[in-house]
Amino acid sequence: MIPHSYATDSQSKATELASAVAAAVSLPQIASACAAVESFLSKHAPDQQRWFFSVTFPALICRIFGFDDSSPPSATTKRNGWIDVATSENDSELSGRIFSLLSPNGLLLSSISGVDRLSLVKYVFPNERLPEWVRYMLQNEQDCRVLTNLCALFRNRIKEDPIKGTAYQVQLNVLEYYLFWFAYYPVCRGNSEGSETVKVQRTKKFRLENWSYSIPGLSSTKRETEKKTEGNLYMRLLYVYLHSFVPSQDLYVQPYRSSLLHYSPGYDSSVIERAEFVISTMIQFWLVDSDFSPLPTDLCKAIGVTFPFRSVLGETPPVSGLGDVINVFMKYLNLSSFVAMDGLDESEVRSPGWRVSGSENAVRTRDAALSVNSSGSWNLMIQRPLYRYILRTFLFCPVESSIRNASQAFSLWVDYMVPWSISFKEFAGLNETLRLPTSNSANCINELPTPGYASSWQGFVLGNYLFYSSLVMHFIGFAHKFLHTDAEIIVQMVTKVIDILTSNVELMDLIKNVDNVFHSKTAAEPSKSTLTGLNRYIPTIRKQLQDWEDGLCESDADGSFLHENWNKDLRLFADGEDGGQQLLQLFLLRAESELQSVSGNNLSQNLQSLDSLRAQLSQLFGGPLSKSPSQTSQPRHQPREEIFKPRCFGSQTGAEIKFKGDWMKRPASSDEIAWLASILVNISGWVNEKVGLDRVDPRQGAASYLEVLSDAKSVHGTKETMKVVFSCFLAWVMWLCEAGVQLLRRHGLRVNLRWLASKRIVAMLLLVIVFNLFKRAFAL
């Protein structure tokens, strides 16, 4: 038992240390505070550190991450968090001191481990800092019960607030509490940066320079990215935590289990449970967060749960600035899984997500893999959240805001599609700097002779097929949406994606073959199929398409081309105006027009890039793409209306386009009131739907005729005469309205009230109203 005087002394020292930590802002003060914390922990055993973790540790977290700043940082003010100070000052000595304090082998985390073993301290993580969808779930008891049943991260961690009684809170031990704040740190930075983002001012020759600096393969090199990671203190901490808490070995010799969180009674599962906690925490804070469909739809339907988040969260894009940390997170998890599967025999591999063999005993269907997983398949945990994160970024990226998030999401997507280009050599500098050992399996991976696609990657492509097909179609819509901002960079981005799809003949054939099987009658009727070859993956791809794209559609986001077939079909190789070939050919025509309108010095080089892209597309779709006859014409400038107007080529007419990509559903411009435009567009759409102007009349061109009744009667009296006259007048008015509707439908016209959302018109109406009010007031 600790003496009372000793406990009082520990409390006073912990209070003094908390004051010193809170006041540490300058470089010498931060270094001194780190030394004081290490000195205090070294002098006290874990059972004597209760006051440190009760008083000092919360203040330490605030100072490390800068959460205690009274005002959000701006462009003119610096962050006072220790990580931010060390990064901005580029002080390697201070960074090393902070890293030593926070490293897994440091005194702080070692003390945390000892305190957690004794269960001395529990923390309550503030609800307002949790992921958005979790915040709403904590508002009532029923939703909390659903949350604990469906999300393993919060299982046994949600407790009733003892003070309020009806409120619920998340209680964590010390390590869990620290990791929650560690994951929240980039989210907090992204929110503060996003709140101060100013709208991009357009010029005659608009250039989004930031695109080229964050997209791999366009201007930056891989070594520059590695140096950025090595010099960033938070990135170094992230990597070392992943290396320590999510090891790439010793996890994969365990027996198969029915779930990632269920183990045999005699097995100590603390290592894997901690690894899963770390991964789930980062997934929820970084990838899910404001997603209105946070959990798989099949799981929710099985339990009978529906989330009403779509009306609350709506078209909320992911937090900006998370692309770099997610990229490191994604690469490490994939590498860990690859190392694990590389160390197993083919007979031990149960998931087709990594390898494909000719033996049916060695390969199970993807459905079985989703329910019986190898512990190394971390990829299965991040597939859906990562896909929805990238897709939500593409769909909900505002036209006139910072494009940093979209560029980082594009980089993340490109890196994910080429896992064969990832190796532990990318982290060699970090391993050397942090003096971390590299496993033998990792060395074997690094010694692979060809870094390109090989048949051994077929399982990965099949397990992540939507990244190579459906997401490409959504990206084409994104490219059409942003083409007018910087045609040169957008063309390079599209070229990068098509280059990946056509980089290997075997990969290209695999993507095409899966698409063919997907649309075949045999795949549509699995009961009549033997489910051999690629057919075994089709049912799961269909489920993934409906689940991963649940509620995500371009029609509400940008009025694009895919809203008639969203999350129902694969359209990359489909025929018709909404197929990938037609939309990419339309993109080539628009890109050529945009590049010519810029009239830059590198016009000829840009047109050559378009020819190269056209050749790649011909290779992808197996046929030549038509060239625009105006390629040699003089450059011309186009108004913004022409940019968004759907183009057509060949024998297509305006009626055949069915109003896809129409001007009415364009993104809100700077001269419009966004909320008023949204309301007016919805009203216009409702009127067009009721009147029938949103579709082509199938009876168009058919002859009209009247059927004369044989039992005609005579009209007698004034009352009957008036009734007949009124009926004729009403029939004439209805005929006139029908004729007007037919005329509008014949010419492809619709009701469009969006012009009333113009700021000029609204200002004029307000002036008229104010003038009349003043006129009446003075008249009285």
Image: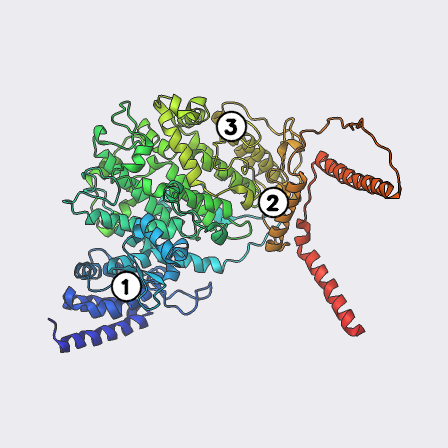
In the picture of the structure, the residue carrying the numbered disc 1 is 123
Q: Please tell me how crowded label 2 is: few (under 14), some (14-19), or many (20+) other residues with Cα within 10 Å.
A: many
Q: Is residue 377 left or right of residue 302?
A: left
Whole-percent x, y for residue 358 in the image: 28, 22
Viewer-proximal residue, 660 or 92? 660
Count of numbered marks:
3
| Closer to the eye: label 2 or 1 | 1
Asked whether the beta carbons under mark 2 and mark 3 sit within 8 Å of each other, the answer is: no
Please state, as top left, top right, bottom left or bottom right, where the N terminus lies in the image.
bottom left
Please tell me which of labels 2 and 3 falls first in the chain.
3
Viewer-proximal residue, 713 or 374? 713
Q: Please tell me how crowded label 1 is: few (under 14), some (14-19), or many (20+) other residues with Cα within 10 Å.
A: some
In the picture of the structure, the residue carrying the numbered disc 2 is 665
Viewer-proximal residue, 324 or 116? 116
The amino acid beneath tag 3 is Ala
In the picture of the structure, the residue carrying the numbered disc 3 is 574
The amino acid beneath tag 2 is Lys
The answer to whether one can see residue 496 in this image is no
Whole-percent x, y for residue 232 in the image: 33, 54
Please tell me which of labels 1 and 3 falls first in the chain.
1
